[in-house]
Structure formats: C-alpha cells, structure tokens
Image: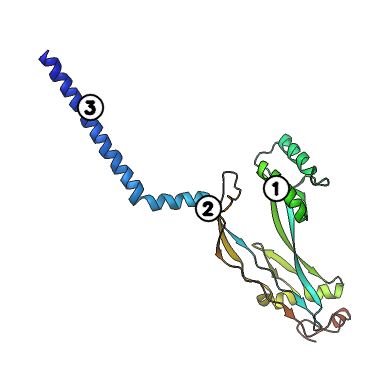
Amino acid sequence: MDNSIDNFKKRASRLLWCILIWAILASCWLFYYSVFARQKYIELGNKIAVRQGVYYAGRGRILDKNDRVLAWSEKYFDLYLMSSEDDPNIRSMTLRKVTEILPDAALHRVKDSDFLLKREISPEKIIALEPLLTKFPDLKIFPRTERKVVDYVEVRNYIGRVESLDGNQHGVSGIEKEYDSILAGTGGVYEVMLDRHKNWVQGTWLLKRKAVSGNDVKLDVSLEEIKNNEVRLGTK
C-alpha cells in the first residue's frame, strides 16, 4: 500500500512539474509575442490588411487670352467585372443582375478574366448599383479622367496631347507639354483597410497627404488666332 501511495505521489509530482514547466514556457512565449515581437506582427498584419493608394489632383485648364477655355479635364466612372474565377455561369448571372439597372451593359474582355461592363456611369446609377457592389465583390467601379479640347483640328494640334502615367495626366506635346509643370498637380496619398475580397472596409480611409490641384494656364493668343494658324507653339 505504501509503495502504491509513493508511486502515485511521484507520478503526481512529475505531472505537476510538467504542468508548471509548460505554464512557464507558455507565459514566456506570451510575453515575447505581446511585448518584444508585438510591433513586428502588427506591421506584418498591416501589410496584409492595409493598402496605400494615390488619388490624383485635377489638371489645370488652358485658356486663351479672352478667358475662353480651350482644354479641360472631365472625370468619368466605369463599371468592371474583375472576375476571380473564369466561370461563364458566374459572369452571366452577374451580368443579368447588372442589366436590371444598366440595360445596355455588356461583357467586353479587357485583360485575362477582367471585363468592362459599362462606361460613363451616372451618379444616380452608381447609387443604384451599390447593393450589387456589396453582393458581388468582383464588381468594381473605377474613375477615369479624359482631357477635352475645343473641337477644332488646329486647336487640338496646338494644345497637344496628354498621356496617363501612373494614373496621372502629363503633357507629351504642344502647350500641354510646354506648361506641364504648371498644369499638373501633386497627387494625394491615402491608406485604407481591405477585407478578404479586397473591398474597402468602411470607416478605415485615412488621408496621408493632401492632393494639390494644378494651375490654369492663360495664353497670350486667342482661339481665332489658333484656328487661323496665326500662331506657333510658344509664340504669337
């Protein structure tokens, strides 16, 4: 009987020591991860959940000497299906729901499994699409900015062209290029948290740097002079 009691005490003692050692190790690991390694894992989690983006400043207008606007920018919103799975049944179902709001929407492949559904969506239609954007995470609305010029060939040639570089407009010819440093603004920077569908989590948008819009450029020539080819670039 005494031997049985002694053996039980020994086994109980070993078990208690094992539990004690485990508790000490667990406490050490908990302390390490909650104190020393805390910042490292917070940064790692932020890299997964938080994304930084750029929103671009408006480009300045170009005016003639009589304050008539020759070139300006207009913003549009386009609807895309960024399909994570190349499944025609899913695409057809999504398109069917979209056409209930946008009857003329159609699938136009733009890259791999990505499709353009509709260009130039009005603000009213964007609001109407909001429930679908929540229900179908692959539906995305992206802004697009177009540079507009007074519709005369001579004016378009004189004003020149812009190209989108990293989402921002920059002049590549004509007046647009000559005065690009004035017309182009400075983009703003924001941070936002994304869910598992890469959608913005409401209330997490944070402004990191404010955008600064470009300035207007007023030329010393008139629209009529440009139309009549009476001026050359940079001169009257």
Could you tell me which quadrant the C terminus lies in? bottom right
| Residue at position x 52%, y 49% in the image | 49
Marks 2 and 1 close (CB-CB < 8 Å): no
Residue at 80%, 42% in the rendered image = 100
Residue 55, by quadrant, is bottom right
Which residue matches tag 3?
15
Number of numbered discs on residues: 3
User: Could you say which is closer to the camera, residue 52 or residue 163?
Assistant: 52
Q: Is residue 138 left or right of residue 98?
A: left
Front residue of 110/16: it is 16
Q: Amino acid at mark 2?
A: Val
The picture places residue 99, in percent across and down from the top left corner, at 80, 43
> In the drawing, does residue 225 fall left or right of residue 188?
right
Residue carrying label 1: 130
> Distance between the Cα atoms at labels 3 and 2?
45 Å
Q: What amino acid is labelled 3 in the image?
A: Leu
